[in-house]
Amino acid sequence: MKQSLLPALVITACLAGKLSAQPPAVNYPAPAAVVPGASTDLTLFGANLAAPTALWTNLPSAKIELAPGIEGNGTKADQVVYRCTLAAEAPVGVYAFRLATGKGVSNTRLLMVDDLASVADNGNNKSLATAQPLTFPTAVDGAAEAESYDFYKLTVPSGQRISVEVVARRLGSALDPVVRLLDAAGRELAYSDDEPGIGADCRFVYQAPTAGDYYLELRDIRYQGSPNHRYRLRIGNFPLVNTPFPLAGQKGTSPKLTAAGPSSDEVSPLSIAVPFDVASGRLPIARP
């Protein structure tokens, strides 16, 4: 009898060892962006995040450290906070990160570098009457709930140009966003679902004919939702560019780039010197 129990005991011990050595898994970061020329405390939510050893990222010239002064930081399995400090010239865009612990390395997650200040979705903005007021310009980090809407309120002067962009699929979110701009009576002024050049994400530009309150309504096109149906809603007065043209430049030359997109006419052509030693064959470009 003792001999017949031995294989079962060995198998149980092996399974227990594997379960206790699960690698970290990151679900999402909050906020969804870090700011150039500043320090941002980035909270990573997920599982098996305790005792982190490093945070890898391709953010340019970033200083990354476990955020100090937070009680229990680095000891919790479901979240950890890192402080990310970027140079002022860090280009706006989408970057990647992975978390390492003594038990392995996490899945790859995406985050933005964004020069817009971040606010959080307050969770109570489910109707026009309870729309969350926003200061123009800004960016909102939120998550869509199933069979629901998120509403935001903007107060702008006459003639104000309003650029609206939802970044979701480009950050690996499950959300397929659709956004509408409404007047105070709930009439639709602008609408965007899938947009050329950015896949399932959406964006538009609108110029307010009169001063007053305007509302943004955001939801998943399929009315789905969860904590992983996350979005970054960007609002301001900025050009919306899908892609540069041409898409490539020969090393050692200075091609003139133009832009394509909903408001690319506001972006003047730019000559870029392409060095011979471009790392990974990609050259980030940011216009001041």
Image (cartoon, rainbow, N blue to C red):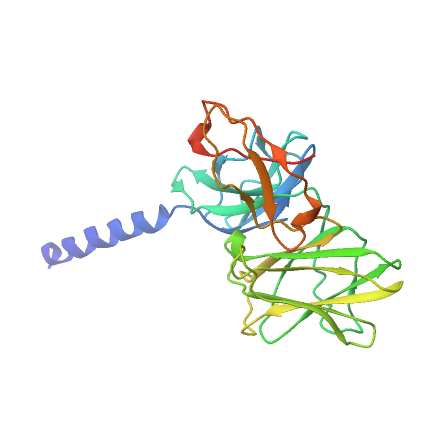
Instruction: Give me the residue at 15% from left, 57% from top.
Output: 5
> Which of 69/176 is in front?
176
Which corner quadrant holds the C terminus?
top right
Question: Residue 84, can we see it?
Answer: no
Say whether residue 8 is left or right of residue 54: left
> Which of 62/2 is in front?
62
- Residue 26, percent across and down? 48, 49
- Residue 286, percent across and down? 62, 36
Say whether residue 283 is left or right of residue 92: left
Say whether residue 231 is left or right of residue 140: left
- Residue 97, percent across and down? 49, 41
Residue 136 versus residue 212 in the image, above or below: above
> Which of 241/176 is in front?
241
Instruction: Give me the residue at 58% from left, 32% from top.
Output: 65
Task: Answer with the quarter of the image where residue 202 lies.
Answer: bottom right
Question: Residue 263, can we see it?
Answer: yes
Residue 214 versus residue 137 in the image, above or below: below
Q: How many marks?
A: 0
> Which of 19/136 is in front?
136
Instruction: Give me the residue at 85% from left, 66% from top.
Output: 213
Which corner quadrant holds the N terminus?
bottom left
Task: Answer with the quarter of the image where residue 255 lies.
Answer: top right
